[in-house]
Amino acid sequence: MTDGNGASGLMEVEHLKLHFPIKQGIVFDREVARVHAVDDVTFQLEEGETLGLVGESGCGKTTLSRALMRLVDSTDGAIRFRGDDITKASRKQLEPLRREIQMVFQDPFASLNPRKRIGQIIGMPLRLHGVQHDQVDDRVRELLDRVGLHPEHLNRFPHEFSGGQRQRIGVARALALEPKLIVLDEPVSALDVSVQAQIINLLGDLQKDFSLTYLFVAHDLSVVRHVSDRIAVMYLGKLMEVSPAEELHDKPIHPYTNALLAAVPIPDPQENRARERIVVSGEPPNPIDPPSGCVFHPRCPRATEVCREVEPPLTRYPGGHLAACHHPLNVTAEEIRQGDRDPTSPLSTGDRLPDPAEAT
């Protein structure tokens, strides 16, 4: 996959799938079903950008982030980093890659070893990669100072720090090997709002100073909008929409994205009362047996027969906005005709499918 100028991105993900087998049997295990955690996901990460990945709990966003780190093996598809396919790379082949890609976890306490001092925790990646002992101590002090902690804190244990301070320690550990890509798995969801702002500002400063690329995984669209250049919306293992952050907020194309945006609290009570209420009924379908056609159709107020029968392709509209929907919102007939889509799609004729609202 390449961008419009033919240049490849820092990381390219093509038709990635992660299906976890469910087995039964006392003596011989046999596979009886599969959990479709990630199902045919394609996107690209450009160097220096922040891509926000959002969706409901259980949509597969954390599983996807762990697959990109090669913490879990994918079922199918490809992951390329700097043009090299790392999908099936061995443990030895992944060793140099570990310097390039790091992760900051959601829980700032569970991700730190309670029996290790902070200096040991931050310095561990350096020691594993052969950095000399005297250089490790200097580097740890430098990292602590860079994330807003005192260098003398290196002899303390994790329980002696607040949640925000522990997340700063996690960020310092991720920075130790000077990576190019950091996967942030809901890094502020466990923190107070005021502390969230501090960590987000810190991440922004570090990105500028070290030319970092972020994959920011979260469920809070207001936070993701603030930190991201682009946003990808995920539902039941699939990408529903990918767009520049501001355009996604002002012009959502997929009904699921529209519903997520409608659920974001607005500080102004008067404006909050005046806006349209969009209610998505029911619970997400079982990932063991996902629906045919569009996976969102059982909960979509705009669903028609074609939504139940045909899976919509991820269509590129003018301006680089992608969405997978047979009945796109905020899109003109001309934009549909200009869209780059699969020729087998019902939209390939260039005509808008009947709008459910117009049918009534």
Image (cartoon, grey):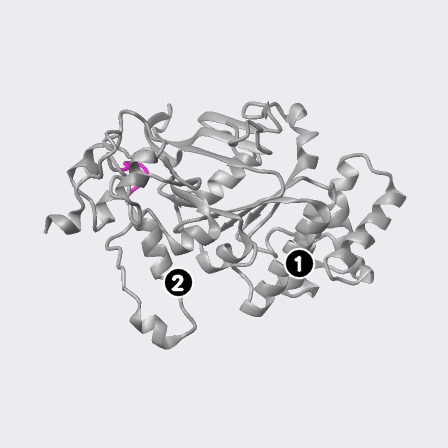
Q: CA distance from mark 1 to mark 2?
A: 24 Å
Left-right relation of 78 to 213 = left
- What percent of the width, then of the height, locates residue 353? 20, 39
- What percent of the width, then of the height, locates residue 114? 67, 55
Label 1 element class: helix
Considering only vertical position in the picture, is 105 above or below 197? above
Residue at image point 34% right, 26% down: 31
Q: Amino acid at mark 2?
A: Val
Left-right relation of 320 to 360 = right
Res 108 visible: yes
Q: Earlier in the sequence, mark 1 or mark 2?
A: 1
Residue at image point 29% right, 42% down: 286
Left-right relation of 37 to 174 = left
Considering only vertical position in the picture, is 305 above or below 246? above
Considering only vertical position in the picture, is 276 above or below 29? below
Considering only vertical position in the picture, is 343 above or below 206? above
Q: Give residue 32's quadrant in the image.
A: top left
Q: Which segment is the magenta one?
A: 286-290
Which residue is the site of mark 2?
264
Nearer the observer, 112 or 223: 223
Label 2 element class: loop
The dot on residue 202 is 1
Q: Give residue 7's quadrant in the image.
A: top right
The dot on residue 282 is none
Q: Residue furthest right?
A: 134
Nearer the observer, 340 or 290: 340
Nearer the observer, 190 or 325: 325
Q: Is disc 1 surrounded by few (<14), some (14 to 19) or many (20+) residues within 10 Å?
A: some
| Magenta region, main secondary structure | loop
- What percent of the width, then of the height, locates residue 16? 45, 30
